[in-house]
Image (spheres, rainbow, N blue to C red):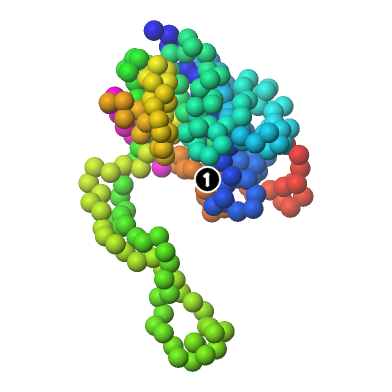
Amino acid sequence: MSETIWVVIPAAGQSQRFGPTNKLDQDLGGRPVLHRSVELFASRDDVAGIVVAGPHDDEAFGAFRERHGPKLGMLGCRLCQGGQNTRAESVLAALAHVPDDAGFIAVHDAARPCTSERLIDRLFETATRAGAGAAIVPGLDVTETIKRVASERVDATPPDPIDAILGGAGREKYAGRAVQGTLDRTGLVAVQTPQVFGAILLRKAYAQTPLDATDDAQLVERTGATVLVVEGDSHNIKITTPHDLDLARRILNVKAPTLRAAHKRF
């Protein structure tokens, strides 16, 4: 079988938990987060090509292509419109742009710009040794206590008749979510990306319906294939909140931009 590796990077998310701006556009040492993530693979001799899946909406995709297209084109990327609703739909759209003769496909989160070369080396080498049935993902043992909590927040302060009369004015509210149980963390791992699969296996996984999974390995599991977890990297964080962006800057040893620099065009 071919040992060519293609990389798929879904980048169609709305970054709702990050705030009013898209996290992939945030400056990370003079380059957007998205560009940093793509650059992890662009100069590798073992990567045959990269497909980046942008927003689904025509207008949003046009703006995305205007912002990122020139640089991503220089890095040898193919751009396509991603899914309308889910990450899995974006990966499926990108798979249509991966050549049929690809041996392996790695799927990487666009918001993971701190992945080390050593981790990528380990994943790619393990996958190519495993062959067509490869399903290799990085993960870290869960060391924190894991609790299941209610979805709704409740006021932690006891009722106060005066507060009720005043309508809560001048009194700070403290809210939390009620614990419903504590999970056994034995055998649990927190999974990261890139996740690397034999191309035929991944396409088979994405031929299933529905595509209701939070990562690619979950879809592969449903085919009956064995997914192997190799040691991940604690620095391989996914940027979800502004705090994560600050942490990524510390990991990469880059400074936050000045107000003036933050408004430059990439």
Give the total number of marks visible in the rendering.
1
Magenta span: predominant SS is loop
Residue indicated by mark 1: 239
Under circle 1, the secondary element is: loop
Q: Residue at x 41, y 37 (%)?
A: 212
Q: Using the rendered view, name the quadrant where residue 75 is placed.
A: top right
Rendered location of residue 66, percent (x, y):
73, 32
Rendered location of residue 39, percent (x, y):
58, 28
Q: Residue at x 50, y 29 (%)?
A: 91
When the figure is inspected, residue 179 is found, relative to residue 21, above or below; the finding is below
Instruction: Report whether residue 44 is seen.
Output: no
Q: Is 61 left, or right, of 228 in this rendering?
A: right
Instruction: Report whether residue 265 is seen.
Output: yes
Rendered location of residue 266, percent (x, y):
72, 36
Q: Using the rendered view, name the quadrant where residue 154 is placed.
A: bottom left
Instruction: Say which amino acid is labelled 1.
Output: Ile
Rendered location of residue 86, percent (x, y):
50, 38
Q: Which residues are magenta?
A: 225-234
| Foreground residue among 224 and 9 | 224
Q: Dividing the image into 4 quarters, which one contains the N terminus?
A: top left
Q: Is residue 231 magenta?
A: yes
| Foreground residue among 219 and 237 | 219
Q: Is residue 261 magenta?
A: no
Q: Residue at x 58, y 28 (%)?
A: 52
What crowding class fits label 1: few (fewer than 14 Cα within 10 Å), some (14-19), or many (20 or more)? many
Q: Residue at x 40, y 75 (%)?
A: 156
